[in-house]
Amino acid sequence: MLDARDISVRLGRSEILKGIDFAAKPGQLTAICGPNGSGKTTLLRAMTGDLPCTGTVTLNGRDIAHLAPWELAAMRGVLPQASALAFPFTVLEVVEIGLSRGRAAGQTRAAMQALARVDLAHHAGRPYQSLSGGEQQRAQLARVLAQVGAPTDADGPRWLLLDEPVSALDIAHQLEVMQIARDFADAGGGVVAVMHDLNLTAMFADRIVLLAEGHVLSAGTVAEVMTSETLSRAYGCRLQVGTAPPPGTPFLLPHAARLAAE
Amino acid sequence: MVALTDPAALDAPAPPDRLARARRLHLWLALALVAISLASLTVGATGVQLLDVAGSLARGEALSRIERVVLLDIRLPRLVMGLAVGAALAVSGAVMQGLFRNPLADPGIVGVSAGAGLGAILAIVLGGLLPPALLGLAGAHLVPLAAFLGGWISTLLLYRVATRRGQTSVATMLLAGIALAALSGAVSGVLVYMADDTQLRDLTFWGLGSLAGASWTKLAAALPILLIAVSGAMLLGRSLNALALGEATAAHIGIPVQRMKRLAILCVAAATGAAVAVSGGIGFIGIVVPHLLRLASGPDHRALLPNAALLGAALLVGADMISRSVVAPAELPIGIVTAVLGAPVFLWILLRQRGVVDL
């Protein structure tokens, strides 16, 4: 379980998160959605330990405030929204940076497999800084995958915390990356992803936590949260949710929403 | 189901291992270091030759007094000082650049060198105002001691300014370092204005940097600090690699970021403070050596730090040889040699990298 209780975050005078409860189960892909400024990334960063916050966050039953950095790193990998790199490391070297100690022998192989998983094995020797934004994002995902290793083992489930993992990607790689997250959850790991694209979310996620103005507006299965009424309230505009062809996931056509507004 | 991943790609060959190549460089640099050290022992104004000395030792003859003094009391402490200071300056540069995630960073930037410099100038100009008893106690150590203290105080001050709730902001620290350097420069300027002619000569010589003052007494004070600082920095390789991805990501990878930053700052302050104290302002080693090594064998700090220690030591001993021989029997301040050698290399690196990789 990833369990966050009564999380509040203040930045300066403004309260970004106001007493949020959040829970995600292993074996599931939990999406955090909501309009700009609703606190999605802040919630994720509070749960990764990046932001000072009040409340408690437990991962597999252990309070993250009491875990050493390397213990946390063994349990979960974090993909930030954007990553700058200071020195001319190659793509492979960037992935290897994420690998913990004691794996030196199989290190390169593990890193190459992670790169192959995100369709970048052929760029392994290139300078990371020469990749496009989308390729860099995938290289970072490979780093995170290499870091956490198997989705679950004797020590319990591993977690992927992804901040807008597909924001810079083309449609094919959006699907590919979401499929990687889906496979990780199906294999017993836990995935929490901040998502902007509601249709991708509907296709791949099990649960949605919908934030608005620092509160949880709605949380539940995709079908429970993705209703015209809830989404319209969250985003402050009229939105209409339809049903895609079988297996019948909900979908949202912004076009339809605009027509509805007129 | 999307399957962009070609199963065959899972066995794609890994690119060449730059870390292994960088580690092979250890050996070559160590050999170069030994060669240049032997050369340095044999070069000097008195014409005492290492080979002659080795010959007489082999024949079982005792060394003449002049040979003993020149080799053991003049050239050897100077060589050891050059090795230690060169390694310390180069490693401080590499650590600073890793910490600030900026390949142009240098210990000078965080104000350690400036603070140490201010300490030394204070001692040179105002040292005479100290009570005679205290002055007698400090003796020849006054200037180095003051330089060392200045370096430490500026580092501590900087750390207080840039650290809040256990988090060090690198941006604040850089800006505070610039402010500190400007302040030290201003105070130093006033002191230089106040100085008399003899002091002015001392200041100039010290400011340009030199190993001429090397002695076993000075080494006894500085060498332990330099050694501890350089060895401590060797522990930082993996952390500095992770830090290249940003502080947050380094923490996610499992690096205790605050602790490692504290160690890095301590190492740099100690190494730079002690180096400036015994040898004055020797520039460019800290910025050129890590640059050259990154070009030669990649940026992996696990190999870069030891390589920087070796190359920094070799370069400084080499520069010292040049400084002792071009105008022999007089000598140039070594800072002039490192600047003349280092500045063009530095500019060349900048030109070379422009447009290739945006640093």
Image: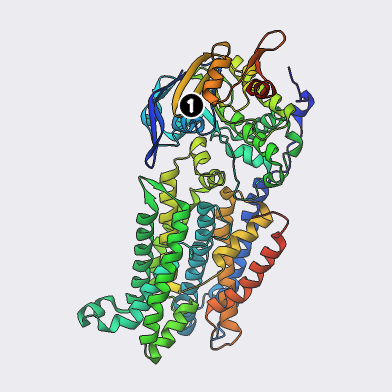
Which residue occupies 70% across, 65% down?
B351
Q: How is the image coloured?
A: rainbow
Q: Residues within 10 Å of mark 1 (few under 14, many from 20)?
A: many
Q: How many marks?
A: 1
In the rendered image of this protein, does residue A178 appear above or below residue B145? above
Chain ID at mark 1: A
| Residue A15 location, quadrant | top left
Q: Quadrant of the C terminus of chain B?
A: bottom right
On the image, the x and y values in percent for residue B268 come to 45, 58
Which residue occupies 67% across, 34% down?
A138
On the image, the x and y values in percent for residue A148 come to 56, 27
On the image, the x and y values in percent for residue B165 come to 35, 45
What type is the residue that disc 1 sits on? Ala
Q: Which residue is mark 1?
A: A212
In this view, the residue farthest toward the bottom is: B197
On the question of residue B216 being in view, the answer is no
Q: For this view, does A162 lie left or right of residue B190?
A: right
Q: Nearer the viewer, residue A202 or B173?
A: A202
On the question of residue B88 being in view, the answer is yes
In the rendered image of this protein, does residue B201 appear above or below residue B56? below
Mark 1 secondary-structure assignment: strand
Q: Quadrant of the N terminus of chain B?
A: top right
Q: For this view, does A118 lie left or right of residue A30?
A: right
| Residue B103 location, quadrant | bottom right
